[in-house]
Image (spheres, helix red, strand yellow):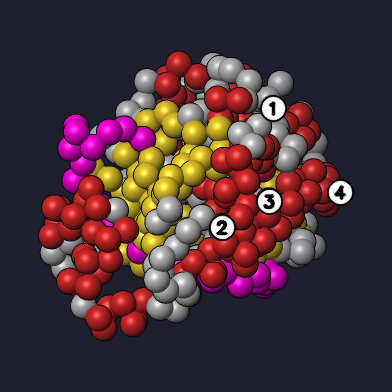
Amino acid sequence: MKANVCVVGGGPAGLVLGLLLARQGVEVTVLEKHADFLRDFRGDTVHPSTLDMLDEIGLGDRMAALPGRRVGALRVTFDDGTYPVADFTRLPAPHNYVYFVPQWDFLELLATEAARFPTFTLLRSATVTGLLRDASGAVAGVRAVTPEGELEIRASLTVACDGRDSVVRRELGLRPVDYSAPMDVLWFRLSRRPTDGDGLAMRVGSGGLMLAIDRGDYYQCAYLIAKGGYDEIRAAGLEALREQVARRHPVLADRVGELATWDDVKLLTVKVNRLERWHVPGALLIGDAAHAMSPIGGVGINLAVQDAAAAARMLGPKLAAGQPVTEADLAAVQKRRRLPTVVTQNIQRAAQRRIVDPLLHATGRIDAPAPVRLLKRFPALQAITARLAGIGVRPEHVR
């Protein structure tokens, strides 16, 4: 099987890249190792810059029709009250909000739109097992296993969008620089009732932070714990976790019993890292494969989509014309996207070090830290945090 571009990974970066290249007439094959997109651990947060880009390619109305929740402001509740930390309504309309939408719906929308183009192919249940090389040693495609058997896909360019545990990255022998994160996340569902109110609830208490994402008839809950603390929590027992959840979010106290076994709780290991070099001859790495982001700000999807938009805009014309993509071309993509990645990760690391880590190890009453109180005292500052989270550094556009 042949393609101009082989994209490994059918997440936000992979499908956006595949769609944008197919729109330019580039033959692109996207490999997704799962049979569908239904996995709860995928993030929900779609930011204004991504919504702007979807508008630019005519998908704005269809995106707005998905079963999501629009959140105009982010607030955090401490023991001394609730504090606003980002006001997205201060951003330019029409996308002056964050959209919490189940990622499987978002991915199906992208896949359905891309399938309209004859140069796009999505292969599900296709697991990459190795890389192909040409006579010079450059990457020339991938080997994969599918339900129908083994498959080779030869391509002039291979793009790794296969996440923080990237198979392509491993096969290339590339190792990211790791920046330690102080927390991991417990991920679970609890039912939601119409009387609960809409939107997002973020609550801080002794020893942790909990986020409840409104998904209509249930909450997707992210419960932050200290890095490496899962075994201790597990040893304390499920009832102790239920009590902590109820204490953190009292509205949910009457339904924590829905956590019936430990199978209902998933551990997500947080990583923050970045490759020094995102490319080799014949291959480019973007999204989490190149830079795993902290969950702070929920910007992982946004950064991955922006990487894909930049790569499609910068490499698409050459690929569509049948011209070879050089290492200089791939280096230009990294140069464009490295600055927003570094700036965003540095902000996340500072927040982890100065806010999250102390909260995770605190005992007793937890009042809002000084930076959070400052945001409440001077509301105009909330536009800055909203812009950093919602639009970011160097947002990309589609011509």
Which of label 3 and label 1 is nearer to you?
A: 3
What residue did someone put label 1 on? 397
Give yes or no for residue 292 being in the magenta stretch. Answer: no
First to last magenta residue range: 172-199
Q: Earlier in the sequence, mark 1 or mark 2?
A: 2
* Position above or below: 11 against 120: below
Which of label 1 and label 2 is nearer to you?
A: 2
Q: Earlier in the sequence, mark 3 or mark 1?
A: 3
Q: Residue at x 56, y 30 (%)?
A: 88
Is 218 on the left-hand or right-hand side of 131?
Answer: left
Gap between marks 1 and 2, in whole Å?
36 Å
Is 316 on the left-hand or right-hand side of 213?
Answer: right
Residue type marked 3: Thr
- Check disc 3 and report its element: helix, strand or loop: helix
Residue type marked 4: Ala
Gap between marks 3 and 1, in whole Å?
19 Å
What residue did someone put label 3 on? 344
Gap between marks 4 and 1, in whole Å?
22 Å
| Quadrant housing residue 256 | bottom left
Q: Residue at x 44, y 79 (%)?
A: 228
What residue did someone put label 2 on? 369
- Check disc 2 and report its element: helix, strand or loop: loop
Q: Position of residue 53 (x, y in %)?
A: 61, 26
Give the camera-side residue of 309 and 248.
248
Gap between marks 2 and 4, in whole Å?
46 Å
